[in-house]
Image: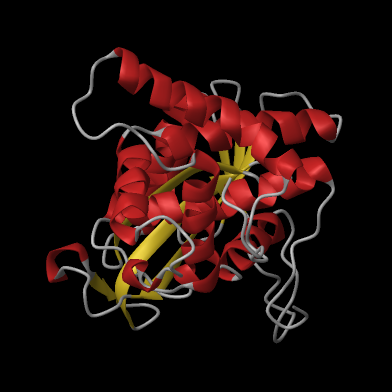
Amino acid sequence: MTERPAYPSDLSDARWALIAPRLTAWRQARTDAGVRGRPASHDLREIFNAILYVNRTGIPWRYLPHDFPPYRTVYGYFAAWSKEGIFTELNYRLTGLVRDHHGRQVTPTASVMDSQSVKTSTNVPTATQGTDAGKKIVGRKRGIITDTLGLLLAVIVTAASVSDNTIGIDLLDRATTTHPTLAKTWVDAGFKKTVVEHGATLGIDVETVTKDPQVKGFSVVKRRWVVERTLGWIMQHRRLARDYEALPDNSASMITIAMIDNLTKRLTGETTPTWRYG
């Protein structure tokens, strides 16, 4: 890695060791397959550090500091890793390691599902946006399903006008493909009968958890607080405070990258500074 002053978002040696084998194997596979282009000259760790910098700070790609590789190069790697599922694969492997670290079975049996509507930036194509009529938000909707530790099992990004039912069905399909042991999920009232019925066809008991109507104002809702906390985690990454990505799949990758950042720190015992405290 090029010697330069470290940024707070940089990977430590221990965190890089968790990620390096997959990225190194990816580059070697491309070399072995004879993928055309210039010979790779940029350090993979610096490429990933640059992606984390964008994810954490929220800057446009072209505003990357000059001590990182060129922004076009960094974005090229981001786009390739997003398209080829490298971020998803890293998240899957790290999730298993964290679950094992917490004394859980590597494969989860229970999950929690939720959605979040966010505004979009001016560069996002109109065709991929919509209006969440309930929350009065014009933009996109993020659907996530987590395990009971709040670790990401699947994510989807759609226009905000897409119903929670549609998102819930897709999330269940994706989650059970990679985690076939799932047998239970908790959801809010936005996920209707269709999701419950679809879950039953997959062998998953979908249970709706609602807020106590007797409690006024904010309250912690049983089971659902786990996934809501995860949404809070990812919102500390400023690139996710609004949806800036032209492609919904790239938006999903940005969420996955935020979770990879979280997972690697859990495994190495490092802290995640908040914007309030540093």
Q: Is residue 165 visible?
A: no
Q: Quadrant of the C terminus?
A: bottom right
User: Which sits in the foreground, 42 or 106?
Assistant: 42
**Nearer-the-camera pick, 150 or 43:** 43
Q: Which quadrant of the structure image shows residue 151?
A: top right
* Place of residue 200 in the rendered image (x, y in percent of width and height, measured from the top left): 48, 30
Where does residue 65 sit, x and y in percent of width and height? 46, 70
Whole-percent x, y for residue 209 in the image: 63, 56
- Tell me, yes or no, if residue 32 can be seen here: yes
Give the quadrant of the N terminus.
top right
Q: Residue at x 28, y 56 (%)?
A: 72
3 sits left or right of 48 in the view: right
Give the colour scheme shown: secondary structure
Residue sitting at x 74%, y 62%: 272
Position of 80 with respect to 117 (left or right) is: left
Q: Is residue 52 above or below residue 38?
A: below
Whole-percent x, y for residue 39 in the image: 30, 31
Residue at the outermost top position: 32
Looking at the image, residue 116 lies above or below residue 223: below
Total marks placed? 0
Residue 167 versus residue 86: which sits nearer the camera? 86
In the picture as drawn, the residue positioned furthest to the left comes out as: 127
Q: Nearer the viewer, residue 246 or 224?
A: 246
Instruction: Tell me: 94 left or right of 187.
Output: right
Picture residue at 77% right of the left edge, 46% below the top:
266
Q: Is residue 16 left or right of residue 269?
A: left
Which residue is drawn at the image coordinates 73% and 79% (left, top)?
A: 214
